[in-house]
Image (spheres, rainbow, N blue to C red):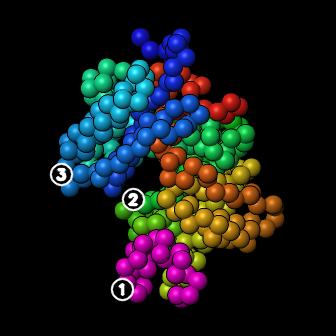
Amino acid sequence: VSGRQSESGRSEVVAAVDVGGTTIKGAIVGSGGRIAHRRAIPTPVTEGPQAVVDAVLAEVRALLDQARQRESSGACSVGVVVPGFVDAPAGVARFAANIGWRDVALRALLADATGIPCAVDHDVRAAGVAEAALGRVTGFDDAILAVIGTGVAAVVWSAGTQVTGGTRLAGELGHIPVWPDGDPCPCGQRGCLERYASAGALVRRYHQATGRTATAEQIVRLAEQDAAARAVWQEALTALAIGLASCTMLVDPAVIVLGGGLSGAGEVLRAGVSTALAERVVWREPPPVELSPLGADAGLLGAAILAADAAGLPGLIRTEGGA
Ligand SMILES: [Zn+2]
């Protein structure tokens, strides 16, 4: 039976896994979000959906072995976050296009394999949980976290509550149309923000313009001296500003926090979005734009918090005063 604090004062840890389209990241996380051990394996997408499930289970077993070596008591629970549509209460990954999953009863598989409490949730929602507990959103009742990576998604808080939506589809910042007649998007719409402002879009659009291959990070750096890189980067900032201006009008966030892989670009991203937003939001003060201090670890830390919740230890990872 889970849910008891240790009486011996031993350190409690959880195992956390963030399943991405290219990498499965794992960590052992202790009190306050301290990452005691981390590992990563490539996601075997080309080997099919079952291979990805097997890889996740193997990753969890490896983490639990590691936890037993480090803490005699081992990990008290497991949290796994995945992309796509996730039915968190049921513990089922309903649909994840980039890893080929459809109706994978992941929590049941994890519970069978480990015999300890397990939680399964959506990666961006989990990143929001971490941001509210340990990151830049702490202390704000109204905020937006924009997660800019391979795609773009957001977490919206209103009056202290994470907004999920009537059909649990809130936060699709990446599919806000920013140019009505823009590029077609795989989602079926045209001109979606994600077609211009994701890391993937930067790479694709720079290649279309120049025939050259560069990573998103390289393109951001090249924007200083290379006109094509500058044009692609500026268009990304404009798309983000248009989308975030709409969000500002709708929910009046006290802060906009930028996270995800592209937030590694740092101040050039923060200042670029802040300036582009201020050019569009003119009749009122635009909300401040800040960088997430959690960076690419937000999903992993969110998984750890959800694992701690599943073990009945909600205060293990969350810092005092966190959401
Ligand atoms: Zn779209």
Tell me: residue 141, above or below residue 249. Answer: above
Q: Is residue 204 left or right of residue 163?
A: left
Residue 187 badge: 2
Q: Which residue is mark 1?
A: 211
Q: Which residue is mark 3?
A: 47
What is the distance, in whole Å, between disc 2 and disc 3 at their CAs? 25 Å
Residue ID at (67%, 62%)? 245
| Label 2 beta carbon within 8 A of ligand 1 | yes
Count of number-bearing discs: 3
Q: What residue span does the magenta drawing correspond to?
A: 202-227
Residue 165, visible in the rendered structure? no
Position of residue 24 measured from the top left corner of the image (x, y, whole percent): 34, 47
Q: Quick one: SS at disc 2?
A: loop
Position of residue 103 measured from the top left corner of the image (x, y, whole percent): 28, 37
Query: Looking at this view, is 77 or 161 the one in front?
Result: 77
Instruction: Name which residue type carries label 3.
Output: Glu
